[in-house]
């Protein structure tokens, strides 16, 4: 361990992230930590990343890259440990075959560390729907123009084809391959609405209609989280029929292009809704300020709703994301800011009511 201080090594981070968990990745991360300290193939994979920022979670990048090997049939010895593939082998026994895979694919896995974690959590669409219900009720506008920031593959744009339920209400086709049942807790008034157009932006969009894009999205969902895999698979099926649109652009520039020189909206025009989920914590302060300024400027002359499912700045690590909305009436009056509720990190369940 020459050159590494106690509490600051990758091995320490791996063990802290595993946090005593008994699931597959808990055992895998403890194996990575031990092997890194012993100078095994794990050390070679992470060569040059010893001082990587904690937020880059390089261990999850590696585990996703290993998962891609499994999904493409190049690590058959690991398949029995991956529950989403039907595996039932004890997670506690995964490390020896995983270490062998790392040793066999060291260079490829090292190169894969450049691929940042990127998921498109389908469950978070329930938070979007709650925000849309609230905005429609506030404005009386039932037609929506949806703009998504940090959209990844844009799968939230497929909301019209998802089936979502809450106490006494249901939304979307009941035969949808995406079933978000009992996704919302609390009394909420479900209202009729139509998403007329939907489009998003991302710095590194994923094309959900390609095998490469589907593989990437799937690899970052933990293999033992079967509900998330089921939801993602269903959304990818829908994406084949209704491809989302995601432009490669930063949110601040993209919003300016989307708003353009739009004339003041007529009451019959669709309500513009800007939506984002668990993305702003990755934005630099300049981007946050630029997006806020653009929204405020547009909202002074147009009806506009911003719906966000984000962690509160400076909140505790175990704090749930908050669902908040900001509503501009387009008449230069101050915006209305609302706390609608909270959500699980992966979206479901949404707890409406603050």
Image: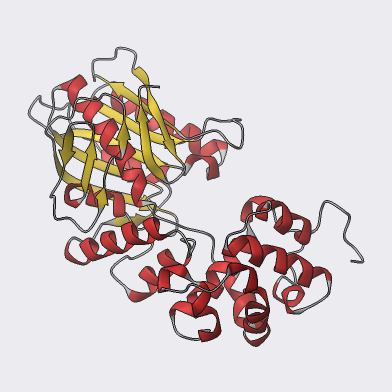
Left or right, residue 337 beside residue 332 = right
Q: Position of residue 305 (x, y in %)?
A: 28, 29
Q: Position of residue 152 (x, y in %)?
A: 39, 55
Q: Is residue 110 visible?
A: yes
Q: Position of residue 137 (x, y in %)?
A: 18, 22
Q: How many marks?
A: 0
Question: Residue at (39%, 51%) from the top-left corner?
Answer: 121
- Can you name the residue that lies furthest to the top here? 333
Residue 294 drawn above or below residue 122: above
The quarter in which the C terminus is drawn is: top left
Of 318 and 339, the residue lying toward us: 318
Question: Residue at (39%, 74%) from the top-left corner?
Answer: 212
Question: Residue at (28%, 43%) from the top-left corner?
Answer: 147
How is the protein colored in the picture?
secondary structure
Left or right, residue 186 beside residue 168 = right
Residue 41 drawn above or below residue 146: below
Residue 41 drawn above or below residue 192: below
Q: Is residue 114 visible?
A: no
Residue 271, by quadrant, is top left
Q: Position of residue 276 (x, y in %)?
A: 38, 41
- Can you name the residue that lies furthest to the right here? 2
The quarter in which the N terminus is drawn is: bottom right
Question: Residue at (39%, 43%) from the top-left corner?
Answer: 347
Of 296 and 49, the residue lying toward us: 49
Left or right, residue 97 beside residue 288 = right
Residue 116, by quadrant, is bottom right
């Amino acid at each position: 361990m020459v050159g590494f201080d106690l509490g600051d090594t990758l091995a320490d981070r791996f063990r802290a992230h595993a946090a005593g968990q008994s699931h597959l990745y808990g055992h895998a991360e403890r194996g990575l930590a031990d092997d890194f300290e012993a100078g095994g193939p794990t050390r070679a994979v992470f060569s040059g990343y010893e001082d990587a920022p904690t937020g880059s979670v390089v261990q999850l990048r590696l585990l996703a890259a290993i998962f891609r090997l499994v999904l493409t049939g190049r690590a058959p010895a690991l398949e029995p440990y991956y529950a989403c593939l039907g595996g039932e082998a004890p997670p506690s026994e995964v490390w020896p075959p995983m270490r062998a895979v790392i040793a066999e694919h060291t260079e490829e896995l090292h190169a894969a560390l450049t691929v940042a974690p990127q998921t498109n959590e389908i469950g978070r669409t329930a938070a979007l729907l709650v925000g849309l219900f609230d905005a429609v009720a506030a404005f009386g506008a039932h037609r929506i123009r949806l703009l998504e920031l940090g959209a990844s593959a844009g799968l939230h744009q497929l909301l019209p084809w998802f089936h979502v339920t809450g106490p006494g209400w249901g939304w979307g086709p009941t035969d949808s391959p995406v079933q978000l049942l009992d996704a919302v807790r609390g009394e909420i008034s479900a209202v009729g609405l139509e998403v007329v157009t939907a489009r998003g932006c991302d710095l590194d969009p994923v094309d959900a209609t390609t095998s490469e894009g589907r593989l990437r999205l799937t690899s970052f969902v933990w293999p033992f989280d079967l509900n998330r895999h089921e939801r993602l698979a269903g959304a990818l099926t829908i994406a084949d029929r209704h491809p989302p649109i995601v432009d490669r652009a930063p949110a601040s520039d993209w919003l300016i292009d989307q708003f353009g020189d739009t004339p003041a909206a007529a009451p019959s025009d669709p309500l513009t809704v800007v939506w984002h989920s668990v993305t702003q914590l990755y934005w630099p302060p300049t981007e946050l300020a630029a997006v806020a300024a653009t929204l405020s400027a547009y909202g002074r002359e147009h009806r506009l709703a911003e719906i966000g499912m984000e962690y509160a700045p400076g909140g505790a690590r175990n704090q749930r994301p908050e669902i908040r909305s900001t509503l501009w009436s387009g008449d230069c009056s101050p915006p209305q800011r609302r706390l609608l509720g909270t959500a699980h990190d992966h979206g479901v369940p949404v707890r409406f009511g603050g």
